[in-house]
Amino acid sequence: MKFENILEEIDGFGPFQIALIILLCTPRIVLPCHFLLNNFIAALPPHRCDISALHDGGLFGNLTQEQRLTVSVPLRENGEPKSCEMFAEPQFQLLDNDSNAADLPTVQCQNGWVYDNSSFTSTLATEWDLVCDRKSLTKTTSTIFFFGVMIGAIVFGFLCDKYGRKNTLLASYIMAIVFGFSSAFANSFILFAVLRFLTGFGLTGISINSIVLSIEWVDTSHRSFIGVIGSLAWSAGNMLLAGFAFLVNDWRTLIMTVTAPLGFAVLTWWWIPESARWLLANGKVEQAQFYLEQCSKFNKRQKLSSKLKMETQSSMKSLEKQEKNYTYLHLIKTPEMRRLTLLTGIVWYGVASTYYGISLNISGFGLDMYLTHFIYAAIEVPAKLMIYCFLNIIGRRKCQAGTLLLTGICIAINIFIPEGLWHLRAVVAILGKGLSEASFTTIFLYTTELYPTVIRQNGLGYTNFMSRLGISVAPLVLMLEDVWTVLPQIIICSVAIISGLMSLLLPETVNKRLPETIDDVEKPRRNDISSHSVESSGVLLELKGTTETKQ
């Protein structure tokens, strides 16, 4: 008997599974708030050189503030003061309207900067003067954070498969809370960068555990529903981030605001069940039966039959003798697993790099940054609902390839639309953002169905590593606009199209049972749901001595 048949007896989609999704909503809402936090805490407000030190009580001291700026700071073409330059000496002749400032000598700001605090009370840029020749450091903080997420993906992928989903989820909660709040009190840029790295490391466990726990507790026919509808918490958190940032203008307070909900998540952790599928795969029969009986009771089904218990215990006697310690090496030990590992790594890199390449660029469309971020987040909701409708109709593989290719096309179109047509550019960018989110939603579900239970978290840890690698590179790619304005768009477009084509080489998983062991991937059996045939492999809960398949 396979695990799906157990779920059929205790109800694979009932109040128990819905309650699990609700319990995991709070931490999943926090994820986008931290992942896209740099859009606001690292914002670069308008600024100019500080000329207060030039006040010497003489002629300069008798000028109005506007006149002081005229003789001290050169102007841009639009009439605004330049951000990083000032005149080497006060140019009093500029007070005469006929004077020309074209060839006057300038120097870099000598006494710091004055910032426009109308939108932000404080940001990383204003706190540590990350402007002009240091402005790249604001995007570097985002890269450092995602490097932490990337390393965390590998570590938590291993820990989750070795020690279970629930325990590592609690560890993730605690790490994210401790380092998240600590980063809000950092007194230097280096300390802040280190703490953001550790915060990203801790948040990874939440990211990979929440989706897997949800998927492993539902039956096959409802996997796409859980994967897509459950991910709406991400979209909700993304929209809330725009609201939080609009209301909280200080970067330290904003970090504490978006981290605080994890305190509630720790309280709800006690009611989150361990994955019974993982427990059975690791020979922990009694614990698995406890959670299965809880599920049966919560779903108002009869208790597990004694026959089912006998089947479980009988099969585990032989399973306990098998190797239980799976590592990342098992991802490349066999031919089909090597192929799967290579392809999913490329697709995850492309999906993540494309999504964050768009999400981290919320300027340039003539819209307020808060409104742009909110629209980018809101478009994800219809995108998720759309992809939910198509996942079971045309399959995971075509959805994955289609959304990536269309995202690439949207980015390519925007390269050729003039900046003056910002309305049209904004519409195309928002459409591309929705499609990139649809590809992200698909790949999360698709990957959990491709990897076998015994190394599913290792597989997700590896793919999360590849995705965070793509995310870490995304802010650096956006910095290439200083070299050539459209170069970042060309790179992101190319990555989206290449990864979309690679996804066509993956196997289809719609209406297929989750693979339990590596043999299920290497030697795929007839596990189409329509056949209802249940064959013996890996974590088979079959009655000792039974050789016939069951309906």
Image (tube, rainbow, N blue to C red):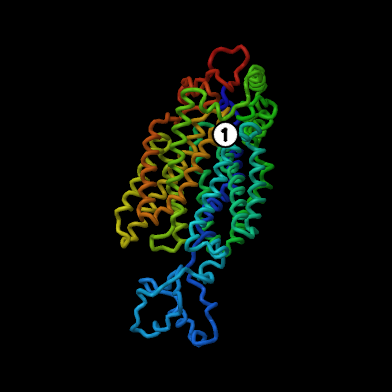
Q: Nearer the viewer, residue 462 or 53?
A: 53
Q: In this view, does 496 lie to the left or right of 199?
A: left
Q: In this view, does 379 lie to the left or right of 330?
A: left
Q: Is residue 394 visible to the viewer in this orientation of the structure?
A: no
In which image quadrant can residue 159 be found? top right
Q: Dot 1: what SS? A: helix
Q: Where is residue 415 in the image (x, y as percent from the top left)?
A: 32, 53
Q: Is residue 181 left or right of residue 378?
A: right
> Which amino acid is tagged 1?
Gln
Q: Where is residue 153 in the image (x, y as percent from the top left)?
A: 56, 40
Quarter holding the N terminus is top right
Residue at coordinates 46% horizontally, 34% vertically from top-left? 344
Q: Which of 431 and 111 is in front in this view?
A: 111
**Above or below, 211 relative to 539:** below
Q: How many marks?
A: 1
Residue at coordinates 45% horizontally, 30% vertically from top-left? 509
Tell me the residue that label 1 is attached to: 457
**Above or below, 70 relative to 530:** below
Q: In this view, does 339 lie to the left or right of 189?
A: left
Q: Is residue 523 visible to the viewer in this orientation of the structure?
A: yes
**Above or below, 337 relative to 376:** above
